[in-house]
Image (spheres, helix red, strand yellow):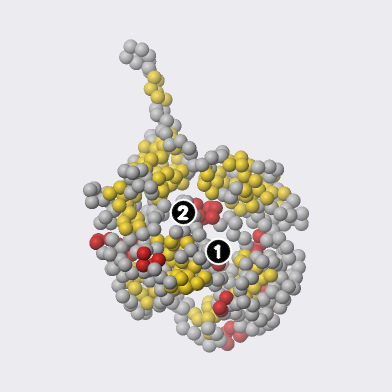
Amino acid sequence: MNKNLLKISIFPAVLFSLFMFSHLALADQVTGDLSTGLNITVGTTVNGVVVAPPVPSPAAGPYTGSQSVALAATGSTSINYTVDGTTPTCTTGLVYNGAITVPSTMTINALSCYSNGAASTVAGFVYTIIPSSTLVAPAIVTGGGGGGGGGSYTAPTTGSISGLIYSDTNANGVYDPPTDTPLSNWVIYLVGPGDASTTSASNGDYYFGNLAFGNYTVREVPQAGWGQTEPPTNQNNHGFAVTLSSTSTIASNLNFGNNIQGQVLGISTTAAHPDGTLIVDNRTIYLIQNQELYGFRNRAEYFSYGYNFSQAVPANDADRLLPFGGVLKAMSGTVVLDSSDKRTVYIIGANSIKYGFASAKIFKALGYSFAGLPVINLSDYPVGAAITSAAAAHIEGSLVLDSTGTAWWILGGQRDGFGSMAVFNTYNFASGRIVPANAADMALSLGPLVKLRDGTLVQDGGAYYIISDGLALPFASSASLTSWGYNLANAVSADISGYTAGPTLP
């Protein structure tokens, strides 16, 4: 199932938002002139010439020892950075003049500065240094001879966190031996002043010691085929919040229960996930469509659909037997800077066809901007005819806004409206994607109302559903929903009375 597709790191999911996207280039992070599809130079205006943030070496991420981080930015005159959580500018912060020593967990915020006065966006690089020792420094009591008279007490300065990882056979969120059994070799991690990770022992126990006082969040790394039952998935993003202090040095019994997918209450699930579901298998994400697996080659193409990694659920054995349907390129309606030359801008239409623009004037008149464009290699996208008129209707997949404030989605040569804001939000469209409608757009015939996105979890009247192929598939219970690997916290409240009900998911 690999197919050289986009892979995600299994190290603490909470860190994705901190360092996983640090190398995702945007159009306002690329040096050089931009063109609009016919190699016509836009020029060196604020919309055209843009710059890149520094690139760190080694890359941000978790390490087991001190690191020496070098920063580089081609063409820049200087790099400014901070390590104290503040945001640098080209006149504030530290001026980079050599490798930065990272002895402990640290965030390096940095930007590139250029001779024409331009500055890149600020990039944050998070380095998590995992402590090599897990020993607790004990409190020390000393005393004089003959019964300890005159003794002194040294207060502890560190604390510990511990618990158990177990198989929750009946999914009740409580450890019930001997029915429930320990799980070994599961990864548990901390986020806080002393970031760390460890694995559960053969008896299911995990332990962190020698921890500085402060606030921590404790989480486990999910494993394919399992759903978490303790703590509840809506609690601290699947974890425990802990405060260690001089008066509270030990946090114990922070247990994580997990249930094999499809085994809740004795029910066995052998079916693949419904269409519209994002699954992750061996760190590779697939979208299930027409009961086939579709992959993504890179983050930029994946994000063009408005997806995030928290939506993906562990694949089950039935998912793995589905045929591979192909690779999904950028979503239609996405305006992209082509990384193959770093200067040509296209809009992606139906069937992954890329369309250039005859001039920057036409590009801007259609409402588009050069700022914040995703950067994707479009060398294998088929080429369509250049867009030569701003009076023409927008390309397939475009989002347009009419003079009354109504949003329309150009699909199949029609303009489709959204029945509610809840429906619109399920697509998580990138900010700035919607542009003003023109007369040609408004002359298009009206299409059907856009439905909730396939794969959307919905709560309506206390019941849970997943939208799949336009149908509302009910779950037998909330426990059924989590047994399939879905997260209750991802469910949106919506009225689905207008949807045809599909078969119940056990």
Task: Give the residue pinned by disc 2.
Answer: 10
Q: How many marks?
A: 2
Image vertical order of residue 391 relative to residue 299, above or below: below
The residue lying furthest to the top in this view is 146
How many other residues sit within 10 Å of disc 1, few (<14), some (14-19) or many (≥20)? some
Q: Secondary structure at mark 2?
A: loop
Residue in the picture at 48% in, 37% down: 132
Left or right of residue 329: residue 49:
right
Left or right of residue 191: residue 71:
right
Residue in the picture at 28% in, 61% down: 263
**Mark 2 vs 1, N-terminal side:** 2
Image vertical order of residue 9 relative to residue 195, above or below: below
User: Residue 395 is drawn in which quadrant?
Assistant: bottom right
Left or right of residue 239: residue 52:
right
Residue in the picture at 53% in, 81% down: 411
Residue in the picture at 30% in, 63% down: 262
Viewer-closest of 394 and 319: 319
Residue 252, x across and y down, in percent: 34, 41
User: Residue 20 is drawn in which quadrant?
Assistant: bottom right
Residue 494 is at least partly visible in this image: no
Residue 211, x across and y down, in percent: 44, 37
Residue 147, x across and y down, in percent: 32, 14
Which quarter of the image is occupied by the C terminus? Answer: bottom left
- The label on residue 477 is none
Residue 58 is at least partly visible in this image: yes
User: Residue 405 is drawn in which quadrant?
Assistant: bottom right
Task: Give the residue pinned by disc 1.
Answer: 298
Q: CA distance from mark 2 to mark 1?
A: 16 Å
What type is the residue that disc 1 sits on? Asn
